[in-house]
């Protein structure tokens, strides 16, 4: 994906983009959770071992943050993104465990050019994260605003 600049016109319904991977360590899981989601099954080995999870697992918010990083590195960081009006649904399907490698796919579900602001459009998408076994662990559904491709000869 590097080197490519993404504009509204680059997205179309049904498009699937494989973005990249990230392996999460136990130390990262515990550090993130200690700061942002200090539930015992995220930060305490003994408590996590006795929980329904049988060991330390990543916070769902950590999973979403890792997915966001992959999306930014692959698409948003080199795009005409104007931010997002929000998410519609987040699902934590399976726990993410230490040493899991997440792969993220960006699926475009709908696009709509703005009728009132011709310089932009909205892209609806689903992000899917799978572990190294191919199991779906998290989905995020939301939307993003993107600038339209500049006219030829216009400043980019």
Image (spheres, rainbow, N blue to C red):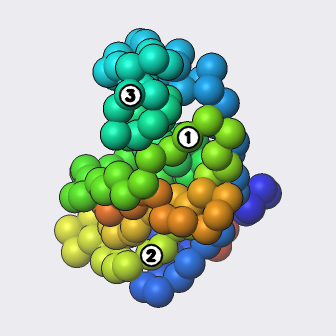
Q: Report crowding for label 2: few under 14, some 14 to 19, many 20 or more residues within 10 A (C-alpha).
A: many
Question: Percent x, y for residue 74?
Answer: 66, 54
Return the mark for residue 97.
Answer: 1
Decide: is 98 above or below 45. below
Left or right: 18 with respect to 49?
right
Question: Percent x, y for residue 42?
Answer: 42, 25
Residue 119 seen in this snapshot: no
Q: Nearer the viewer, residue 154 or 134?
A: 134
Q: Residue at x 38, y 20 (%)?
A: 47
The residues bearing labels 1 and 2 have C-alpha atoms spaced at a distance of 28 Å
Q: Report crowding for label 1: few under 14, some 14 to 19, many 20 or more residues within 10 A (C-alpha).
A: many
Question: Percent x, y for residue 108?
Answer: 44, 75
**Residue 153 image-quadrant placement:** bottom right
Q: Residue furthest right?
A: 3
The residues bearing labels 2 and 3 have C-alpha atoms spaced at a distance of 40 Å
Closest to the camera, between mark 1 and mark 2, is 1
**Residue 18 image-quadrant placement:** bottom right
Label 3, secondary structure: give it: helix
Residue, disc 2: 108
Closest to the camera, between mark 1 and mark 3, is 3
Label 1 or label 3, whichever comes before in sequence order: 3
Q: Nearer the viewer, residue 26 or 63?
A: 26
Q: Residue at x 62, y 26 (%)?
A: 26
Label 2, secondary structure: give it: strand
Decide: is 102 above or below 18. above
Q: Report crowding for label 3: few under 14, some 14 to 19, many 20 or more residues within 10 A (C-alpha).
A: few
Residue, disc 3: 50
Check contact, mark 1 vs mark 2: CB within 8 A.
no
Label 1, secondary structure: give it: loop
Decide: is 119 above or below 113. above
Q: Residue furthest bottom?
A: 14
């Amino acid at each position: 994906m590097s080197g490519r600049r993404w504009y509204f016109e680059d997205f179309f319904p049904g498009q699937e983009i494989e973005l990249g991977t990230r392996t999460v360590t136990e130390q990262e899981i515990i550090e993130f959770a200690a700061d942002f989601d200090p539930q015992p099954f995220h930060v305490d080995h003994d408590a996590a071992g006795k929980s329904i999870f049988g060991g330390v697992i990543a916070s769902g918010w950590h999973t979403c943050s890792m997915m966001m990083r992959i999306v930014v590195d692959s698409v948003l960081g080199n795009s005409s993104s104007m931010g997002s009006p929000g998410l519609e649904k987040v699902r934590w399907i399976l726990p993410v465990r230490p040493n899991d490698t997440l792969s993220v796919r960006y699926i475009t579900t709908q696009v709509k050019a703005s009728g009132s602001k011709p310089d932009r459009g909205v892209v609806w998408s689903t992000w899917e994260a799978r572990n190294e076994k191919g199991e779906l662990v998290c989905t995020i559904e939301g939307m993003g605003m993107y600038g339209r491709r500049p006219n030829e000869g216009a400043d980019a």
